[in-house]
Image (tube, rainbow, N blue to C red):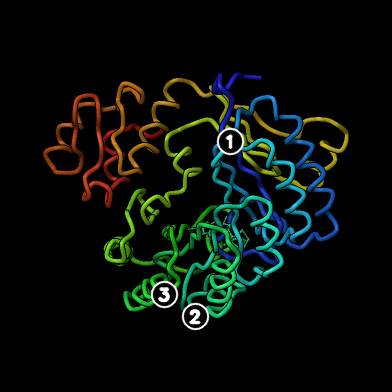
Amino acid sequence: MTAGDPAGVAHLYVHLPFCASRCGYCAFVVEVGREDARDAYLDALIGELHREAGVLGPLETVYLGGGTPSLMGAERLARLLGEISPLLAPGAEVSMEANPETVTEELLGALAEGGVTRLSLGVQSSHTPLLGILDRRATPGDAVRAVELARASGIPMLSVDFILAVPGQSPADLAADLEWIAAAGADHVSWYELEFKEGSAIARGDMVPADDDLAADLYLQAVEGLEGLGYRWYELANFAREGAECRHSLAYWRARDYLGIGVGAVSTLGDERRRNAPGLDRYISALGAGAEPPRTREALDADTRRRERWMLGTRVDDDLDTAWAGPPDNPAALDLMRAQGLIQTGPGTVRLTRRGRLLQNAVMQQLMDFA
Ligand SMILES: C[S@@+](CC[C@H](N)C(=O)[O-])C[C@H]1O[C@@H](n2cnc3c(N)ncnc32)[C@H](O)[C@@H]1O
Ligand code: SF4
């Protein structure tokens, strides 16, 4: 096994793939239904955690993502958290994703008890017709109820996920989302633009993406609206109240090593990227037989790492250390980008300006040669 961080990997992702149905825009590794397999999956997951524990140092962050992790239910999640808790560093962040219609007082009690510090609710929109376009099962009322239960549960941090540039979304709809977020008093907001991902139903169907200019206007409206509510725009699609940044996501954007366990999970360990294969039954039977899960391994060469450091590092509102990241593919473009007010540079540092952040894709196209 390729060595990762010599002090031990400090970030763990756990994939919990079960969903009640597949949303049309979703291309994640998801298993619809399969109640019959959930106990066996949990056994396999814990088996993989034990197999891989040797690469871990004290864990600074853990992220239980999906899928719909909340569908695993209170008892199974309590068991999983019980396996993870001895591995945590003091003050560790433990996040879990939950879909609003699955949130109950019993579930949140088990999460709080098990050490979850951050609940990430997939709200996506406050507007019923847009929730319909996204195939969401939750109503706006479910989301309000989930927020109230989360606040009462004692889990310290609440994050909400929204989606931007949904076909048919107007600036008035987005203004309503902002009001909803203000009323919910979320500590953190993720607001990604709808992607027509390969493998999703919407990429195969006849739904038309929002017009580019409208999408750019909605993005700016979201950024300015959330800043007006006191959130810091600390990453291109992420906003936090003071001290509520997602430390786990920051580790990804800073290109730190992380271990991912579960079906379809990805790990970056030193100069190796491992991808567990999709396929629930194969995953369960491999771990059940004491073998490693079916997976691919890719050696990360220096150029790949350098490009990833630029792509990820310019997403956050922080200096990119060029001694650490290495040079961009086209260093001459730096002067042009600076003259256009898209980047600012210091001794050994680069960061995107506010305008540059709104146009990060275009800036990266200039600085990097993409195959
Ligand atoms: C993998 S989902 C899992 C969370 C949970 N099951 C849910 O749906 O709320 C994590 C987040 O990714 C975002 N997401 C998923 N697919 C997306 C897409 N095609 N375009 C933009 N955002 C997407 C959604 O905001 C979602 O909350
Ligand atoms: S978006 Fe969330 S709930 Fe919908 S299918 Fe994907 S993982 Fe499941």
Mark 3 vs mark 2, foreground winner is 3
For residue 133, side relative to residue 212 (left or right): right
Ligand 2's quadrant: bottom right
Q: Distance between the residues labelled 3 and 2?
A: 20 Å
Residue 129 badge: 2
Q: How far apart are marks 2 and 1 (CA)?
A: 44 Å
For residue 293, side relative to residue 121 (left or right): right
Residue 206 higher or lower than 237, as above or below: below
Q: Residue at x 82, y 36 (%)?
A: 287
Do the CB atoms of the residues marked 3 and 1 lie less than 8 Å apart?
no
Taking depth in this image into account, of 289 and 181 the one nearest to the observer is 181
The image quadrant of residue 332 is top left
Residue 367 at x, y = what percent?
27, 34
Residue 226 higher or lower than 145, as above or below: above
Q: Which residue is denoted by mark 1 in the rendering?
A: 89
Do the CB atoms of the residues marked 3 and 2 lie less than 8 Å apart?
no
**Residue at mark 2: C-beta within 8 A of ligand 2:** no
Q: Which residue is denoted by mark 3 in the rendering?
A: 183
Taking depth in this image into account, of 100 and 1 the one nearest to the observer is 100
Quadrant placement of the N terminus = top right
Q: Residue at x 25, y 38 (%)?
A: 351
Residue 217 badge: none
Label 3 residue SS: helix
The amino acid type found where label 2 is placed reads Pro
**Residue at mark 1: C-beta within 8 A of ligand 1:** no
Residue 369 higher or lower than 163, as above or below: above
Taking depth in this image into account, of 106 and 257 the one nearest to the observer is 106
